[in-house]
Amino acid sequence: MRSGSSGRVNEKAEPIAAQAFCEPRDVQRCHDRLLHFVGTAPWSDRDVRRAAACYAVDEMRKQDPVTISIVDDTGFLKQGKHSVGVQRQYTGSAGKVTNCQIGVSLARRIGESRLPSTSSCICRRNGLTTPPAESGTYP
């Protein structure tokens, strides 16, 4: 999970470690091992997300066909300019021009279910939208 921040990974590893062991004395050791694995593993989190999305779509297609693909852009309001892609731009979330990031997500509707497939932060430079360096294509 190289693309995530270490704080977010730490927050997510702690409950996993707590559920993995019944003995409280083993939780910290498991937590440390999970953080070490996630931080140094040679696998790509992008490939893991792609495999999980493919598996989920295949399983859901057994029930119903994909009926629609949903592309959604969302503005994430931000204070300051330290996050990637933050700049003054229009977002419908605020209904005005303000500091924000723009994220685009793709989801599939299968029967009555909605399955998120992928998402990206869109960075604008000189008024042109440039996709992230690693844009993935999912099922």
Image (cartoon, rainbow, N blue to C red):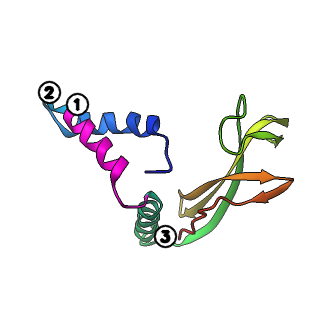
Distance from Cα at disc 3 to Cα at disc 1 = 43 Å
| SS at mark 3 in the image | loop
Given contact means CB atoms under 8 Å apart, are the residues at marks 2 and 1 in contact? yes
* 80 or 116: nearer the viewer: 80
Looking at the rendering, which quadrant does residue 70 occupy? Answer: bottom right
Q: Does residue 59 appear left or right of residue 17 in this picture?
A: right
Q: Amino acid at mark 2?
A: Arg
Residue 21, x across and y down, in percent:
17, 36
| SS at mark 1 in the image | helix
Residue holding disc 2? 25
Query: Marks 3 and 2: which is nearer the front?
Result: 2
Residue holding disc 1? 28
Looking at the rendering, which quadrant does residue 135 occupy? Answer: bottom right
Residue 51, x across and y down, in percent:
42, 66
Instruction: Give the magenta-colored segment's residue range.
Output: 28-44
Residue at the image point whose x is 75% and y is 59% from the top = 130
Q: Amino acid at mark 1?
A: Gln
Residue at the image point whose x is 22% and y is 31% from the top = 28
> Residue 7 in magenta?
no
Residue holding disc 3? 64
